[in-house]
Amino acid sequence: MSATDIRNELCKYARKTVSNKLVVGPGGNLSARHEGKMYLSPSGFALDEIAPEQWVEVDIESGDITDIGLRPSSEVLMHLYAYRANPSIGAIVHTHPPYCIAFTLVEQNLPVMFPDQAALVGTTTYVPYVLPTTDRLADAVVAKVNDYSTILLGNHGLVTTGRNLREAYYRTEVVEESAKIWLIASAIKTPKALTDAEYKEIASLESEAYRIELLQKMK
């Protein structure tokens, strides 16, 4: 895959992020890793308005930014630190999904409740509110990225990682659906989570292993 392919793929998932109402206005940011660089959404743009050539190239090791006249997202440090900390991360999706934000206002721990969540996401961790765009938030997120692929940010949103954009993006959708299900069910009574044994049983299914392998390969 070339840098051009990466830029086009970023546009594809940026549009999906907006169309599925996972961000509004100029909120959220996406990035993907390619040959020692990351390609990150520019500051001040709605994600579905970014053209392929406008994704900002940043050298991961040095933090140097390619001068194309655009500033990278204000969360550049969060992306940069995460790529440095975990070489297996190929893409990062940071969104402001309404159900996820609502969930963080009342709870911290999102239980595993249904098969897609168990297989594609697993355990989601939580970071209490930290001022956005700061190195403190970047440090708080990077402390989790070696152990979790989905991180709820208190009063803020969601960060997901994956080996490619497809994986990171679909984890975003599944966590948002999980938060929605929890909030709906909790209006009636305490939701029933899967037991550890049930969770592990789903994760061990050959069909789920195949689906995850396919997800990681496809764009």
Image (cartoon, grey):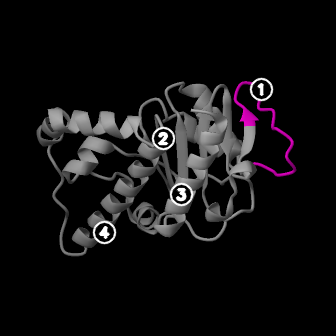
Range covered by the magenta-colored residues: 58-72
- Residue 180: say if magenta: no
N-terminal-most mark, 4 or 1: 1
Q: Quadrant of the N terminus?
A: top right
Q: Under tag 1, what secondary structure?
A: loop
N-terminal-most mark, 2 or 1: 1
Residue type at numbered disc 3: Thr
Q: Residues within 10 Å of mark 2 (few under 14, many from 20)?
A: many
Q: Residues within 10 Å of mark 3 (few under 14, many from 20)?
A: many
Q: Which residue is mark 4?
A: 183
Q: Under tag 2, what secondary structure?
A: strand
> On screen, 185 above or below 144?
below
Q: Which residue is mark 1?
A: 62
Q: Under tag 3, what secondary structure?
A: strand
**The quadrant where residue 206 appears:** top left
Residue type at numbered disc 1: Ser
Q: CA distance from mark 4 to mark 3?
A: 19 Å
Residue 179 in the image: state x and y as whole percent. Answer: 34, 61
